[in-house]
Amino acid sequence: MGRAFEFRKARKMKRWSSMAKIFTRIGKDIVMAVKSGGPDPNANSRLRAVIQNAKAANMPKANVESAIKRASSKDQEDYKEIVLEGYGLHGVAVLVECTTDNNNRTVANVRSYFTKTGGSLGTNGMLDFIFERKCVFKIAKTDNIDVEELEFELIDFGADDVFLDEESNQVNVYGEFSAYGAIQKFLEEKGYELLHADFERIPTDTKKLTEAEAADVDKLLEKLDEDDDVQNVYHNMVIE
């Protein structure tokens, strides 16, 4: 069934919480984008992509503008991105992306979630062989878009899978992590309506569990989702 099938399956594994959680995540993304490239989206491609993600999540324009203004202030603390890795019950690999202004607090909290649910937090890089980091773009499908032709064009820019998500009627573009800038530039210059741009961790190996076993792991995933420092949670669990 090919890589596209694996990507679609992995996409469903990515956990999203409430709208408030998503807005918090985007707000932190805005701070980091502004701190690294300035408040002008025309000159800051990273900020431009985050603003587009905010629109796709229905984040009010006033909230976005307020976040940019706060990020431009010298009083706004910068955030650091950290990745924490471990195993939950039944040998499920769990990778946690965090954005924090207090590294010690975040690590201590995440470690406690693993411990309390029967898992264990490990060392950085221990799950590199399980998760592959990809950039992902979602563009609006229009009648003049030929998905196969678009994939052929994007191969030269680092894309390795392009497919139509019939559920959302969006074209998904996956590429190598390092190809983010080249793919973004191509899509923008060609005038495609970019709905979302981000990075995802795609599991290259999965762990099959029963529904009862999956419920055990969900206790860990739920605790992680509730933490404001946690941006994304990835796992390699599939239910038989």
Image: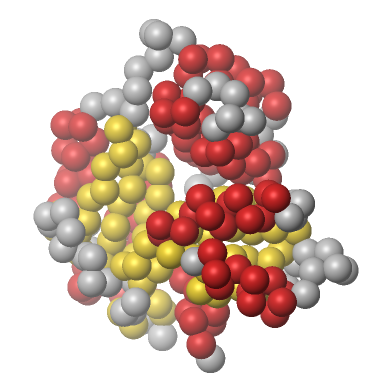
Give percent across and percent down for residue 91. 20, 73
Looking at the picture, tell me which residue is in the foreground, 71 or 102: 71
Along the horizontal axis of the image, is 70 left or right of 97?
Answer: right
Horizontal and vertical percent position of residue 61:
70, 27
Q: Relative to residue 192, is residue 180 drawn left or right?
A: left
Left/right placement of residue 28 relative to residue 104 reads: right
- Residue 64 visible in this rendered orientation of the protein: yes
Residue 23 or residue 55, whichever sits in front: 55
Query: Hey, which quadrant is residue 86 in on the image?
Result: bottom left
11 with respect to 150 (left or right): left
| Residue at the extreme right of the image, as rendered | 143
Would you identify the image quadrant in which residue 178 lies? bottom left
Here the colouring is secondary structure
- Residue sitting farthest toward the bottom: 1
On screen, residue 159 above or below 78: below
The reply to whether residue 113 is visible in this rendering is no
Q: How many marks?
A: 0
Given residues 104 and 196, the one toward you in this image is: 196
Residue at horizontal 51%, vertical 87%? 2
Q: Is residue 107 positioned above or below 150 on the image?
A: above
Name the one closer to the observer, 147 or 100: 147
Image quadrant holding the C terminus, namely: bottom left
Picture layout, residue 69 above or below residue 34: above
What x and y, as percent, mark residue 5?
A: 54, 82
Q: Residue at x 17, y 46 (%)?
A: 111
Q: Position of residue 150 (x, y in %)?
A: 69, 71
Tell me which residue sits at (38%, 35%) in the image.
228
User: Which residue is the extreme one toward the front?
Assistant: 156
